[in-house]
Amino acid sequence: MMLRSVIRRAATKGSSPSLFGKSLQSSSRVAASSPSLLTGSDTGTLLHRGTHAHSFHNLAFSGNSSFSRLASSGSSTLQRWVKPFSSESGDTVEAVVPHMGESITDGTLANFLKKPGERVEADEAIAQIETDKVTIDIASPASGVIQEFLVKEGDTVEPGTKVAIISKSEAVSHSAPSQKVPETSEPKPSPPAEDKEKPKVETAPVADKPKAPSSPPPPKQSAKEPQLPPKERERRVPMTRLRKRVATRLKDSQNTFALLTTFNEVDMTNLMKLRSQYKDAFYEKHGVKLGLMSGFIKAAVSALQHQPVVNAVIDGDDIIYRDYVDISIAVGTSKGLVVPVIRGADKMNFAEIEKTINTLAKKANEGTISIDEMAGGSFTVSNGGVYGSLISTPIINPPQSAILGMHSIVSRPMVVGGTVVPRPMMYVALTYDHRLIDGREAVYFLRRVKDVVEDPQRLLLDI
């Protein structure tokens, strides 16, 4: 209103341009010290319609160059004042790190899935956090445009940490390019300066070129010192949280447990024949393929029931015996090894085990498996045969006491009934904690697995 009154007096009383410039300059200082003066309807109309204000300036004060410069700079100043108010509508929301599980207190922000200025929908993932066990997505709480990220990739974050600011309206995304336009237009005169500097840079190496031949030390050093690959051919990549966690747990297993491995071999003829005979009918009824893994899970359950100490664990000076069988299965993914759990495996049939294995393996490979699906477990089965492993010594998954290792099936000559015949054979290994499990129990356990796999009918008769 003050600016409007000054303009009216200048128009009616014939004030000189210099006096009007002083009045406008004083009013500009008042407006700068009190931004609330810009909220009036008249002033807001004048400021938002920058073209009309600029036309008035050209018509009224074309003869006063000093005031023209003042008015032009003042108009840009006023426009900068009004921009924050035009986008300030209280519509910004913050994306925060979600709860990551009872046993996880922090994680590493692995990567951003979106960039500032991009539009996101509600519940759409904008970033990923790597923890010791799983990868967790950070979802946008509402639809809008990402205004800025508050953390960087590689930062350690905790539940509740603010990650990004999201504007529900697209005003911020439209104003960002308009602010960048003057920045790109200002440095345009700089290229000639760069072009002038380029010849100077080129003249420096010309002076150094004659000095290059007078440096024979490299061949002398290469003759005395071993030639190593250049550092440019090496890449340093930080370990993921999952990889560091796996490394720590495996080393703790070696440092804590008295590891010992016993081996045996299994004739896969009958189990493979059973699978080949009923695979079509099994798939038609249950909607899942019949694999060999379910047969070994059932064999491990039977062996654990016959040797309960293998299903137990040491806790201080006590031994905890478990009356349930929760079997962990090792699944290798692109990000590392995860071990989901088949809960209540002793109460499942072949179809239920196969369905559970497929579901857990799919989630593990997609990175959507939850922490609860990997917690616990009383015994682990690891199938290295899918990668072609012939024989290995698996490492116990703490705090369990044993792990069964499966391997590839190879046709080998075997003596059956006094005749040498080819048989599909598999080596199996049991690594156990010798502090708790003696060799006798370990061997009996592995013999039970062998008997059940070679003669699956034992499961029907419970013998």
Image: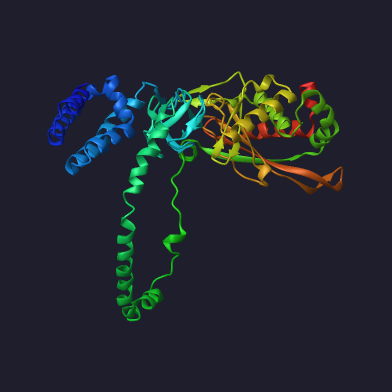
* Residue 79 sits in quarter: top left
Q: Residue at x 36, y 27 (%)?
A: 87
Q: Residue at x 33, y 30 (%)?
A: 49
Colouring scheme, one of rainbow, by chain, secondary structure, one colour: rainbow
Q: Nearer the viewer, residue 68 or 442?
A: 68
* Residue 32 sits in quarter: top left
Q: Quick check: can you spot residue 152?
A: no
* Residue 330 sits in quarter: top right
Q: Nearer the viewer, residue 123 or 45?
A: 45
Q: Which quadrant of the rendered structure holds the N terminus?
A: top left
Q: As drawn, is 427 to the left or to the right of 93?
A: right
Q: As drawn, is 369 to the left or to the right of 169?
A: right
Residue 352 location, x and y as percent? 71, 23
Residue 98 location, x and y as percent? 44, 24
Residue 242 location, x and y as percent? 49, 37
Q: Residue at x 54, y 40 (%)?
A: 335
Q: Is residue 387 above or below residue 106?
A: below
Q: Quick check: can you spot residue 116?
A: yes
